[in-house]
Amino acid sequence: MQPTLPDLERLAREAGQLLRLGYEREHQVDYKGVIDLVTEVDRQSEAFLLGEIQRLFPGHRIVSEEIGVVPGADSDQWYVDPLDGTVNYAHGIPFFCVSIAYARAGTVTLGAVYDPMRDELFTAERGRGAWLNGKPLHASAAEDLRRSLLVTGFPYDTWSSPRNNLEYFGRFARITQGVRRLGSAALDLCYVGAGRFDGYWELTLNPWDVAAGGLIASEAGAQVTGLGGEADYISPPCSLLAAAPGLHARMLEVLQAEI
Ligand code: IPD
Ligand code: CA
Ligand code: CA
């Protein structure tokens, strides 16, 4: 059996409630890397989502951040980020979400991203559009980089990796209205879909960070590609550019220019 968008909406809202309830409490923080952390609420949200997906859609494959891969049919694959924006969450910054996507035969067809602090549910269905709490979403009509507001993020290995995004951040900061760093890749993508940001790029993410938000941004009319302009941005290392259609080519030029 295949899921429908209302199935993803319900899962995202219910997991979001767990995040919201847990937000008020003291968190138990474990470190996965030097700066990469996880809380008990990431795990609670994941256990709920995986339990429900396995109960309702037995045999589907699930790729989820904390647990890894739940084996199943490649033709029915889920991407789950039970809490995107964990560093914000652990610091008491109310900007985080749940991100869930479903891919049929290798193509992401459904996506839901829920921000429980603002009660904002971003959704999309391939070929049908994208919505925020049921209202159609539209990417911005920006064409001039100088007047555009961008957003980006940095990988957890910024201390050690030369591909740390600081060079690109500097380039865009000098030629745009501004570049924000909000700390949730899934919401960054949804905000491009909503026209709140004109463009977003980021390096070395994971499929669960970008699968739902990428579909939402593109169904809202943004152009979403890899950093080289390629159509596939879900295969790791998931470096991607999502931008208003009038800005995408110009942003690619900036990203590809020699230093
Ligand atoms: C992180 C957030 C952040 C991005 C990181 C991601 P997490 O996900 O999306 O904005 O810059 O690279 O890993 O760890 O909070 O689920
Ligand atoms: Ca994430
Ligand atoms: Ca996460």
Image: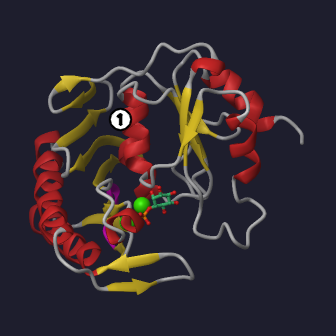
Q: Is residue 195 above or below residue 239?
A: above
User: In the rendering, at what x and y percent does residue 64 appear?
Assistant: 35, 68
Q: Residue at x 28, y 73 (%)?
A: 42
Q: Is residue 29 above or below residue 70?
A: below
Residue 131 vs residue 160, the one in the foreground: 160
Instruction: Specify the quadrant of the image occupied by residue 22.
Output: bottom left
Residue 88 vs residue 5, the one in the foreground: 88
Q: In the rendered structure, which amino acid carries the disc numbered 1?
A: Ile
Q: Is residue 225 above or below residue 59?
A: above
Residue 252 horizontal side relative to residue 256, left or right: left
Quarter that holds the C terminus: top right
Camera sees residue 75: yes
Q: Residue at x 23, y 75 (%)?
A: 41
Instruction: Specify the quadrant of the image occupied by residue 111.
Output: top left
The residue sitting at the right extreme is 259
- Span highlighted in magenta in the image: 71-79
User: In the rendering, at what x and y percent does residue 79 appear?
Assistant: 35, 58
Q: Is residue 75 magenta?
A: yes
- Which quadrant of the render holds ligand 2? bottom left
Residue 68 horizontal side relative to residue 98, left or right: right
Residue 65 vs residue 35, the one in the foreground: 35
Q: Is residue 135 magenta?
A: no
Residue 147 vs residue 155, the one in the foreground: 147
User: In the rendering, at what x and y percent does residue 96 appear?
Assistant: 32, 56
Q: Residue at x 16, y 62 (%)?
A: 20
Cβ of disc 1 within 8 Å of ligand 1? Answer: no
User: In the rendering, at what x and y percent does residue 144 appear?
Assistant: 62, 14
Camera sees residue 67: no
Mark 1 = which residue? 216
Label 1 residue SS:
helix
Task: Give the colouring mode of the picture.
Answer: secondary structure
Question: Mainly helix, strand or loop, the magenta region?
Answer: strand
